Each structure stands twice: as C-alpha cells, then as structure tokens.
C-alpha cells in the first residue's frame, strides 16, 4: 500500500479513482457518492475508519491509504 501524501499529486477529484472506507471492525465499503465520501471523512477524523483508494495506471493499479485527511477534505470542499 502506498501513501497518497507522498505522491505529492494524488488525484482526489479524479473520476477514475475508486475510494473505499475500511472500518475498524474490518468491513469495507465503496464510496460511491459525495455523501459517502463526506461520511467516511468524518469517520476517519474520529478514528472509526481509514480511507483507501485505487488509482488505476496504464499497466497496473495501485492501492493508496489516504493519509492526508486535510487534503482529502479540501477536495470535498469541507
């Protein structure tokens, strides 16, 4: 798993990136709309979950942990 913060240019607003929420009890849910993304943001801030994302590339897709919640929140206009 890679760090979104360390990329320096993670495409938070790209429609190609698939976001997921991993809860502390191990459940995983795809974040399908802005409401899901906002809820996951607040859960992550509260320590109830982590946000993950798959960023597809030409030859492979990489899994990222969204470890800069302020940048993620800014992408949602929060």
Image: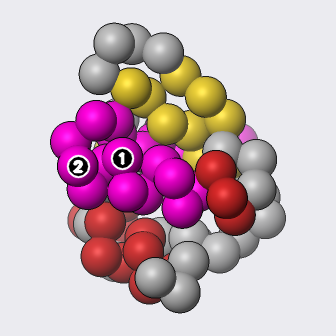
Residue 10 x/y as whole percent: 47, 70
What residue would you read off at disc 2?
46
The extreme left residue here reads 47
What residue would you read off at disc 1?
43
Residue 78 x/y as whole percent: 46, 82
Q: Separation of disc 1 and disc 2 at Cα?
A: 5 Å
Would residue 7 be found to the left or right of residue 9 on screen? left
Residue 55 x/y as whole percent: 61, 51
Secondary structure at numbered mark 1: helix
Q: Nearer the viewer, residue 14 or 58?
A: 14
Task: Name the residue rendered at 61%, 28% in the picture.
Answer: 29
Q: Crowding near pointer 1: few (<14 within 10 Å), some, many (20+)?
A: some
Q: Is residue 28 above or below residue 52?
A: above
Residue 11 x/y as whole percent: 57, 72
Quick check: is 11 in the magenta stretch? no
Q: Are marks 1 and 2 in contact (CB under 8 Å)?
A: yes
The magenta segment is 37-65
Q: Is residue 59 above or below residue 36?
A: above
Task: Name the residue rendered at 53%, 87% in the picture.
Answer: 77
Q: Is residue 62 visible?
A: no
Secondary structure at numbered mark 2: loop
């Amino acid at each position: 798993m890679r760090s979104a913060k360390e990329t320096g240019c993670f495409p938070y607003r790209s429609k190609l990136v698939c976001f997921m929420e991993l809860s502390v009890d191990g459940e995983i849910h795809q974040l399908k709309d802005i409401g899901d993304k906002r809820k996951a943001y607040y859960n992550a801030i509260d320590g109830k979950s982590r946000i993950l994302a798959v960023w597809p590339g030409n030859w492979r897709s990489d899994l990222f942990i969204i470890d800069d919640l302020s940048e993620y929140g800014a992408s949602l206009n929060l």
